[in-house]
Amino acid sequence: MKAGAISVIAVLLVLLVATVYFAHSAWTALGPAEEMPPWFFRMMIGGIFFSVVVGGGLMGLVFYSSRAGYDDDAGHNDGSGAGLT
């Protein structure tokens, strides 16, 4: 591995450790999870599920658009102004 790749990996690992530390400290500052009402967990699970479904759907549309050829002409500007409405 090159020194640049090792540097990038090291920086990303430091960011990961800092993120986990921050998340843990924020979670423990809120108190025990048993004190949170059940509706809170249902809403959290619903929000996570909705985010994953929307993100997965958008990624699916991106891959479909790329494979179907809809993105082939994007970015090719001949200067005529055609297609700009």
Image (spheres, rainbow, N blue to C red):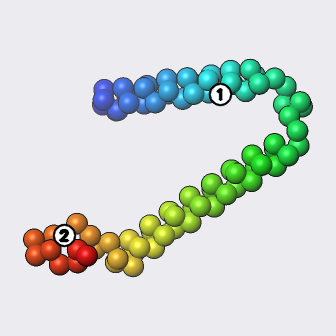
Q: On the rendered image, what quadrant is the N terminus found in? A: top left
- Which of the marked residues, 1 or 2, is nearer the chain's N terminus? 1
Secondary structure of residue under mark 1 = helix
**Dot 1 surroundings within 10 Å: few (below 14), some, or many (20 or more)?**
few
Q: Which residue is mark 2?
A: 76
Quadrant in the rendering for residue 80: bottom left
Q: Amino acid at mark 2?
A: His
**Dot 2 surroundings within 10 Å: few (below 14), some, or many (20 or more)?**
few
Please report the residue visible at 31 percent of the width from the left and 26 percent of the height from the top: 3
Q: Position of residue 11 (x, y in %)?
A: 42, 26
Q: In the image, is residue 75 above or below residue 4?
A: below
Cα gap from disc 1 to disc 2, whole angstroms: 44 Å
Q: In the image, is residue 23 above or below residue 73?
A: above
Relative depth, front residue between 6 and 85: 85
Please report the residue visible at 70 percent of the width from the left and 55 percent of the height from the top: 49
Q: Position of residue 57 (x, y in %)?
A: 56, 66
Q: Is the C-beta separation of discs 1 and 2 under 8 Å?
A: no
Quadrant in the rendering for residue 20: top right
Residue furthest front in the image: 85
Please report the residue visible at 44 percent of the width from the left and 67 percent of the height from the top: 62
Left or right placement of residue 75 versus residue 64 in this view: left
Q: On the rendered image, what quadrant is the C terminus found in? A: bottom left
Relative depth, front residue between 36 and 1: 36
Q: Amino acid at mark 1?
A: Ala
Q: In the image, is residue 45 above or below residue 78?
A: above
Residue 23: assigned label: 1
